[in-house]
Amino acid sequence: MYQTVSHVLFDMDGLILNTEELYTIGFENIASRYGKKFTFELKCKIMGQQTREFAKMIIEGLDLPLTVDEFIVESREIFNELFPNCKVLPGVEKLIHHLHNSKIPIGLATSSSKESYELKTQKHQDLFDLFPYRTWGSSDPLCLVFEDSLNGVLAGRAGGYAGGDFPDTRLDRSLAVEAGATLVLSSMEDFRPELFGLPPYLH
């Protein structure tokens, strides 16, 4: 028996959809144009990264005569054809429907851009509509984290969240800023919700 959980968070590429296979096909295609071979070792290094990051690594790893922008243009042409034909992997649809019907909160977190997500999911929209919470690699932070510790701020920023820090007054505030705090205040009384697009207090 494992630890009981109350929420489930899903990755998309290679977990829900067979897009990792399609990425391999696309990158092999580009590499072969320049007499290079896209290896599984290189693929393992780029998995989970966002577009400009993996483009840079592939260019450097294969010594391709391309800029990052040129690589992105070439790959986009290929993936615009491949992604609409991706398939849901075995067992995934059953599990997502089961969790949804059981009212277990589920979310989707992917490093894919929203544009790429839409290409990949266009034939599976009914399935992806079951996710009430979705975040993409191109998304702005979905959540604001309130913290009073530097470690808490660091953890929040690592998760891609905006962070409000309310440190002990004896703490050097510059340390909170260096840790990535979006906003540093002395008291919650000073917080203005509208700064983060939230409804303002009614006076």
Image: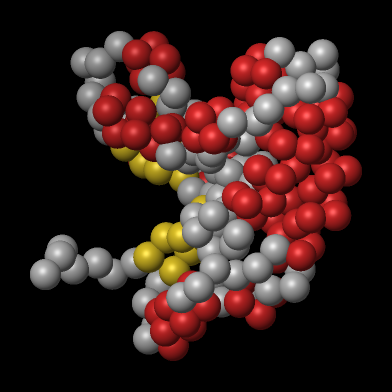
- Residue closer to the observer: 16 or 168: 16
User: Which residue occupies 21% across, 15% down?
Assistant: 170
From this viewpoint, which residue is outermost toward the bottom?
Answer: 101
Image position of 190 (left or right of 6): right
Check the picture and name the quadrant holding the N terminus. bottom left
Image position of 142 (left or right of 55): left
Q: Is residue 130 above or below residue 161?
A: below
Q: Position of residue 116 (x, y in %)?
A: 74, 51
Can I make out residue 51 in this image?
A: yes
User: Which residue occupies 41% across, 72% down?
Assistant: 105
Residue 127, image quadrant: bottom right
Q: Position of residue 178 (x, y in %)?
A: 42, 15
From this viewpoint, which residue is outermost toward the left?
Answer: 1
Q: Is residue 75 above or below residue 95?
A: above
Residue 98, image quadrant: bottom left
Q: Position of residue 114 (x, y in %)?
A: 71, 51
